[in-house]
């Protein structure tokens, strides 16, 4: 190889496994090289290099530069501190085909070269349809960085970075690059992406490509409803009444099974055979009726010689949650007598009634058109719900959970993921299933509900998605500012890591431990990355890369930017109304008003000229 080649960097001086020590050429004094009119930075940590091997080329990423990289056999006083690099080899290209992994290793004194745009075309295969452009190389902004969409979805991914590092903007940019790349009307019009938006950041950023569901919907948005009867019984009972003893759980489960069985006897639900019914089957039943039947049994008293005649004074009403009235029990042998078969669940039933009356839980306990009547009949079935979430004309669905009570958030996320995953799992051989039309679930602020201490509801279903989702077309994208608090099993299953700036040592350690490549030197850059800059490694990136994420346009950026303190404080105060603050607080809505101002608008017609002076 001609060493006058402008791409020439140096020669191989040592090889250890996939690590290669490179001695830089004396001619590289400026740290810059101009190749085909483009400027390339030389010897930058995170940049790519190429090692020719005759009919094939080896490719690697620079992980360390300086005297510490020099072979130990060299005397310290003879080391030229700026003339050494450590490169981690990651793949090879035979002809125009690139593959991860190595079939051979370089030899001592083999030449090492800068990777140019032509080389990157070999690596990323710009002509391949599954490549998504998300940004540019930090060391060469004329070279775009592309990820494999297939690997990004099916092998799961994680976007990790401290607050203020650009996570939300990165998520918005990647999703927009998938469904609507710059300069195109649509890139993946048939995409199915569900975004769990914890803070309500993404509605404005993705409104043109997303259908938005919110607990307290704004104009143009849809109400978020989660039918309670689609959940597994143990999860539902944990939401409704908390922890139960085994006997108490059996009392609730038996009554739920009875109500579900009565519902399928009265109505023809497709796909259900009464002989295959279980307490977890997604069959509608009325919580009002459940409460009424159980409270009636618990409070019932008896009179008569055989103690078998109910001492009922007034019937209650299930619809209004009015309990039946019985004569109070008395001491002695005259009665009325308590129901000796009562299960001791009166306290739990009082909590259930309180939940049903609490407006904050209407989105799950009173789910609109999916709320069963007392006989179990419903206006709309789960097909309408799933069609609204997964089958609409836009590629992204945003489930805005910012209005959900904080103690209830983990349970709700687990419920939503359970409904989605079970639906796609059992429909995997149908065209609507995940196998033929995959689904990507984007989980924002994952450390809040995927830590080992967060409970089992969300954690268990996401662990299942991480381990098995690939086979059924369900991919996960985990977003977190505290990777150290995310369950290790879930993070280890993420085949692609997009790591933005991370300052906490524990968080950096978790990222290093999850990396598939030996890139410890590259990961040491995490504390000094610029906002919106990321190190990407794993299945979707054919080579580990330091990338500058493409910023969306200003109107398509999420509502997560820092307040402009100086600008805001430099303006003179205007009239303020803190009654509006209290109104929004009470209404749990950012757009609530103090008074409903009704303005009557009367159209004004122009006076036509009569022609008279």
Image: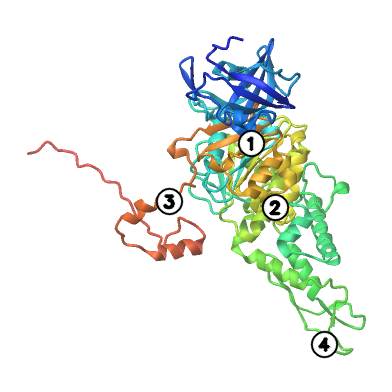
Which SS class for mark 4? loop
Foreground: disc 1 or disc 4? 1
Q: Which of marks 4 and 3 is nearer the N terminus?
A: 4
The tag earlier along the polypeptide, 1 or 2, is 2
The image position of residue 327, as x and y in percent, is 78, 82
Residue at point 74%, 60% (across, down): 238
Foreground residue among 338 and 142 = 142
Disc 1: which residue: 521
Residue placed under numbered mark 3 in the picture: 563
Location of residue 554 (image quadrant): top left
**Which residue does the image show at 40% across and 50% down from the upper left?**
564
Q: Which image quadrant is residue 11 in?
A: top right
Which part of the image, by quadrant, shows the C terminus?
top left
**Residue at which label 2 appears:** 451
Mark nearer the viewer, 1 or 2? 1
Residue 559: x percent and y percent?
Answer: 48, 46
Q: Position of residue 479 (x, y in %)?
A: 62, 44
Horizontally, is 364 left or right of 282 in the view?
A: left
Task: Residue under label 4, please give it.
Answer: 330
Circle 3 packing at 10 Å, graded few (<14), some (14-19), many (20+), is few
| Cα gap from disc 2 to disc 4, whole angstroms | 52 Å
Q: Is residue 181 visible?
A: yes
Residue at disc 3, secondary structure: loop
Q: Decide: is 300 above or below 521.
A: below
C-alpha separation, residue under disc 4 versus residue under disc 3? 67 Å
């Amino acid at each position: 190889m001609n060493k006058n080649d402008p791409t020439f960097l140096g020669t191989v001086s040592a090889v250890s496994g996939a690590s290669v020590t490179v001695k830089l050429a004396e001619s590289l004094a400026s740290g810059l090289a101009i190749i085909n009119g483009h400027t390339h930075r030389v010897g930058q940590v995170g940049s790519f290099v190429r090692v020719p091997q005759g009919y094939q080329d080896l490719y690697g990423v620079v992980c360390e530069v300086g005297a510490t990289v020099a072979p130990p056999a060299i005397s310290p006083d003879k080391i030229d501190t700026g003339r050494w690099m450590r490169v981690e080899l990651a793949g090879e290209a035979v002809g125009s085909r690139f593959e991860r992994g190595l079939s051979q290793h370089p030899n001592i004194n083999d030449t090492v070269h800068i990777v140019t745009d032509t080389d990157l075309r070999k690596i990323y295969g710009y002509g391949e349809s599954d490549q998504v452009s998300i940004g540019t190389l930090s060391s060469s902004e004329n070279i775009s960085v592309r990820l494999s969409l297939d690997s990004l979805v099916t092998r799961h991914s994680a976007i990790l970075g401290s607050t203020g590092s650009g996570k939300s903007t990165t998520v918005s940019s990647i999703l927009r690059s998938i469904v609507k790349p710059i300069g195109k009307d649509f890139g993946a019009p048939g995409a199915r992406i569900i975004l769990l938006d914890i803070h309500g950041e993404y509605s404005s950023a993705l409104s043109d490509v997303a259908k938005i569901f919110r607990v307290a919907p704004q104009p143009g948005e849809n109400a978020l409803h989660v039918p309670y009867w689609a959940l597994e019984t143990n999860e539902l009972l944990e939401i409704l009444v908390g922890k139960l003893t085994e006997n108490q759980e059996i009392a609730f489960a038996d009554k739920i099974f009875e109500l579900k069985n009565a519902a399928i006897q009265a109505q023809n639900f497709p796909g259900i055979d009464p002989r295959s019914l279980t307490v977890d089957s997604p069959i509608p039943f009325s919580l009002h009726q459940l409460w009424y039947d159980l409270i009636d049994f618990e409070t019932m008293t008896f009179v008569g010689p055989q103690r078998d005649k109910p001492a009922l004074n007034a019937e209650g009403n299930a619809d209004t949650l009015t309990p039946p009235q019985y004569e109070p029990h008395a001491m002695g042998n005259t009665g009325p007598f308590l129901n000796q078969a009562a299960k001791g669940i009166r306290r739990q039933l009082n909590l259930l009634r309180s939940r049903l009356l609490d407006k904050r839980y209407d989105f799950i306990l009173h789910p609109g058109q999916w709320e069963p009547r007392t006989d179990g009949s419903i206006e709309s079935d789960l097909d309408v719900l799933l069609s609204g979430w997964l089958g609409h004309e836009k590629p992204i669905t945003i489930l805005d959970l910012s209005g959900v009570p904080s103690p209830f958030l983990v349970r709700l996320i687990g419920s939503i993921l359970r409904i989605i995953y079970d639906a796609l799992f059992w429909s995997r051989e149908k065209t609507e299933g995940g196998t033929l039309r995959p689904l990507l679930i984007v989980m924002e602020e994952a450390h809040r509900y995927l830590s080992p201490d967060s409970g089992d509801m969300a954690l268990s279903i996401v662990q299942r998605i991480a381990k098995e989702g690939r086979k059924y077309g369900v991919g996960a994208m985990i977003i977190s500012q505290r990777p150290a608090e995310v369950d290790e099993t879930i993070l280890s299953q993420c085949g692609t890591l997009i790591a933005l700036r991370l300052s906490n040592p524990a968080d950096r350690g978790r990222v290093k431990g999850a990396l598939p490549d030996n890139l410890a030197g590259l990961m040491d850059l995490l504390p000094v990355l610029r906002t919106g800059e990321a190190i990407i490694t794993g299945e979707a990136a054919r080579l580990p890369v330091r990338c500058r994420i493409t910023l969306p346009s200003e109107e398509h950026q999420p509502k997560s930017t820092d307040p402009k303190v100086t600008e805001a404080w430099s303006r003179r105060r205007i009239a303020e109304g803190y009654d509006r603050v209290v109104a929004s607080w009470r209404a749990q809505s950012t757009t609530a008003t103090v008074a409903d101002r009704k303005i009557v608008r009367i159209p004004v017609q122009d006076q036509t000229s009569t022609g008279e002076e």
